[in-house]
Image: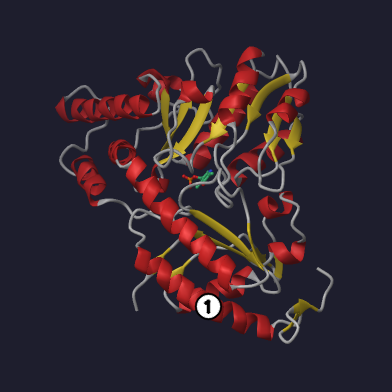
């Protein structure tokens, strides 16, 4: 059975060109970039080239790019690094209700350590209101962190608009752009951000490597102390191969961005329209237009996301759901709950995220098998009356 991978928001397969770019630094050119002999210098040169490339592709300069071990570390470094450096200035941080756990739990951690966190609500489509950001600011506010696009529902935030408000007030602005870099245009000046997180494995690069953009002059304490690597912002011998792979992956992703976005958006809309037309009691989560080109997130009433995933897996389709099974009780995603969805509906969510290899035939297969799976599960559901197609529970 052909496997159909529709979980590109979780991770993407590495491109062959990326692997080729990495191999030399895992073998012959294995030197430590801090060493002065030839193989060390070669590693340093490769890293300098990668840094230049990444900087250029996001509208930054090389000295503003700090390589990290991925998106989660970049988010932690941005938020804890600013909180620590600006503690004497204030203790208030503003975020949104739909952030990735790497931001959400970092803010929770800081709350336990004396910071005041304001969590802004989102509207039914998952959008943060820029005016709400402005009215949440106080004289103690040191940082605002709001993601560029959401990993579950794909909603793209008005980051540039929020950036303009914060620049006027000289308040630091971080955005988690892990879902957007390499997929839609990202330029740090156009967005008006001071800090921006990205991660290679979300754009066909290797896992375990990412970067934090840090605008020149931004005060930031390191998370990892030790050597003076990354201009004293992140100690530790650099992941040279990973960094080389990240840069090539980003270069390739940006070069084909327009074509890929158009292609995925067409397939995305075909999938959304097809499902909504053929399966009743179904809704689209996230914004109808301001959404990532490859993101589909749906709720099917009366059934659970987990059972949907298992049945899709049996048909060779890899997808994801917002709910995670913890100790027998299903806790729906904080993102879907923030949209105002009731628990029982949020349980029936399905995320399908398309990638550069997703074909029209893949979408046809999903449209072919999904109605049968949903129907089967609904017939098994105690909440569903097949004859009347109404819920027995009050939803
Ligand atoms: C995947 C993801 C992360 C985490 O990145 P890692 O490199 O896996 O640590 C953070 N934020 C968002 C929005 C993501 O999608």
- Looking at the image, residue 136 sits to the left or right of residue 159; the answer is right
Image x and y of residue 145, in percent: 62, 31
In terms of secondary structure, where does tag 1 sit? helix
Image x and y of residue 160, in percent: 56, 26
Name which quarter of the figure residue 8 lies in: bottom left
Image x and y of residue 280, in percent: 65, 72
Q: Residue at x 70, y 66 (%)?
A: 330
Furthest toward the right, the residue is 394
Classify mark 1: residues with Cα within 10 Å, few (<14), some (14-19) or many (20+).
Answer: some
Q: Residue at x 30, y 28 (%)?
A: 53
Image x and y of residue 272, in percent: 53, 61
Name which quarter of the figure residue 108 lies in: top right
- Looking at the image, residue 194 sits to the left or right of residue 253; the answer is right
Q: How many marks?
A: 1
Furthest toward the front, the residue is 277
Pick whichever, 43 or 58, lies toward us.
Answer: 58
Q: Is residue 173 something that shows in the picture?
A: no
Give the residue pinned by disc 1: 311
Q: Residue at x 56, y 43 (%)?
A: 290
Q: Quadrant of the C terminus?
A: bottom right
Q: Residue at x 17, y 30 (%)?
A: 39
Pick whichever, 304 or 80, lies toward us.
Answer: 304
Pick whichever, 143 or 384, lies toward us.
Answer: 384
Q: Is residue 24 something that shows in the picture?
A: yes
Q: Quadrant of the N terminus?
A: bottom left
Pick whichever, 316 or 79, lies toward us.
Answer: 316
Q: From what the image shows, is residue 247 above or below residue 226?
A: below
């Amino acid at each position: 059975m052909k496997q159909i991978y529709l979980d590109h928001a979780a991770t993407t397969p590495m491109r062959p060109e990326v692997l080729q770019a990495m191999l030399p630094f895992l073998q012959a050119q294995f030197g430590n970039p801090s060493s002065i002999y030839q193989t060390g210098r070669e590693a340093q040169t490769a890293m300098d080239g990668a840094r230049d490339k990444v900087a250029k592709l996001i509208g930054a300069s090389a000295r503003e790019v700090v390589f990290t071990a991925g998106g989660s570390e970049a988010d932690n470094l941005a938020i804890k690094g600013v909180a620590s450096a600006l503690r004497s200035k204030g203790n208030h941080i503003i975020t949104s209700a739909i952030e990735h756990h790497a931001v959400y739990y970092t803010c929770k951690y800081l709350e336990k350590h004396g910071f005041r966190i304001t969590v802004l609500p989102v509207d039914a489509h998952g959008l943060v209101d820029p005016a709400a950001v402005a009215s949440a600011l106080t004289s103690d506010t040191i940082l605002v962190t709001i993601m560029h696009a959401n990993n579950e529902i794909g909603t793209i935030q008005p980051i540039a608009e929020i950036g303009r408000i914060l620049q006027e007030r000289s308040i630091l602005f971080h955005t988690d752009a892990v879902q957007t870099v390499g997929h839609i245009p990202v330029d740090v000046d156009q967005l008006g951000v001071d800090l921006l997180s990205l991660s290679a494995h979300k754009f066909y690069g290797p896992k375990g490597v990412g970067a934090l953009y840090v605008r020149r002059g931004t005060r930031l304490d390191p998370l990892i102390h030790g050597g003076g690597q990354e201009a004293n912002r992140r100690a530790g011998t650099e992941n040279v191969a990973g960094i080389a792979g990240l840069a090539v992956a980003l270069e390739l992703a940006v070069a084909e961005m327009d074509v890929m976005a158009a292609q995925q958006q067409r397939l995305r809309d075909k999938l959304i329209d097809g499902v909504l037309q053929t399966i009743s009691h179904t809704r689209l989560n996230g914004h109808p237009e301001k959404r990532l080109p490859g993101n589909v997130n749906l709720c099917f009433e009366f059934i659970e996301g987990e059972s949907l995933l298992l049945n899709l897996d049996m048909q060779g389709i890899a997808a994801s759901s917002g709910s995670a099974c913890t100790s027998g009780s299903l806790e729906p995603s904080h993102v879907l709950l923030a949209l105002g969805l009731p628990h029982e509906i949020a349980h029936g969510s399905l995320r399908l995220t398309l990638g550069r290899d997703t074909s029209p035939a893949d979408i046809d297969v999903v449209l072919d098998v999904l109605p049968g799976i949903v129907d089967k599960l609904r017939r098994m559901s105690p909440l569903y009356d097949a004859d009347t197609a109404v819920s027995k529970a009050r939803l």
